[in-house]
Image: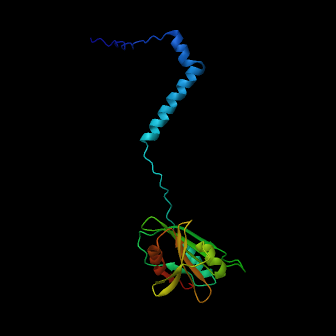
Amino acid sequence: MSDTTEKPAPERPVVEVNPGVYKRLTTGLGGFTLAMACCLVLVGAIYLITPRSDKEVLPTVDYSGQLLAMRSGAPFTPYAPQGLPSTWRPTSSRVDGLGLKGRPVAWHLGFVTPSDQYAAVEQSNENAGAYVPRMTNSKTPTGSRTVAGATWQTYHRKDKKANSLARTLPGGVSIVVTGTASYDELAVLAAALKPQPRT
């Protein structure tokens, strides 16, 4: 007959702490300061080992809904990019004034470019004399540039690091391609813009 009596677990060593030290560590300002210091050290260690990026990542948007709304309801034929490479990422789209009588209609479409800069297409039937300077952040063009057979006025705002290409169509609709992107990248976006007839 086997002995089934359980063996007692080995006792843990007892560390004796001087009563004065124990009191100093667990009570009063000294104990609080020590606890806070330990917490700060732990938080600092977690912060240092946690991977992070300071770069802001903008979400990719689907602007097909706004394009459809513009094609079906705008009082002018909107322009939208066709054939842009996938390295051009749409990050914002906004329609204003649609369905409101007496108000101009405007469509904003923003992109992150292949060089990680910002470029936007702004278009509206608002009076060009007010709309173009507001979108380009400048009243005076710096020159002109031919893109895909069309002449665009160039604008530059040094303090905002903004470049712009702008043209006003015969019907009075203005299109502005603007952003921190270079003129060459803006020209790629401008060349991709194609009229989108009413559906």
| Quadrant location of the C terminus in the rendered image | bottom right
Image-based side of 20 in relation to 115, left or right: right
| Quadrant location of the N terminus in the rendered image | top left
Quick one: 20 or 75, which is closer to the camera? 20
- The spot of residue 12 in percent (x, y) is 39, 14
Quick one: 74 or 134, which is closer to the camera? 134
Residue 130 visible somewhere in the drawing: yes
Image-based side of 15 in relation to 165, left or right: left
Residue 105 visible somewhere in the drawing: no
Report the residue that reaches farthest toward the bottom. Answer: 170
Quick one: 186 or 111, which is closer to the camera? 186
- The spot of residue 129 in percent (x, y) is 65, 81
Picture layout, residue 73 above or below residue 60: below
Q: How is the image coloured?
A: rainbow
Which quadrant of the view contains residue 74?
Answer: bottom right
Number of callouts: 0
Which quadrant of the view contains residue 114?
Answer: bottom left
Picture layout, residue 20 above or below residue 165: above
Report the residue that reaches farthest toward the right. Answer: 102
- The spot of residue 54 in percent (x, y) is 48, 52
Residue at 47 percent across and 33 percent down: it is 42
Report the residue that reaches farthest toward the left. Answer: 1
Quick one: 144 or 70, which is closer to the camera? 144
Residue at 41 percent across and 73 percent down: it is 85
- The spot of residue 29 in percent (x, y) is 60, 21
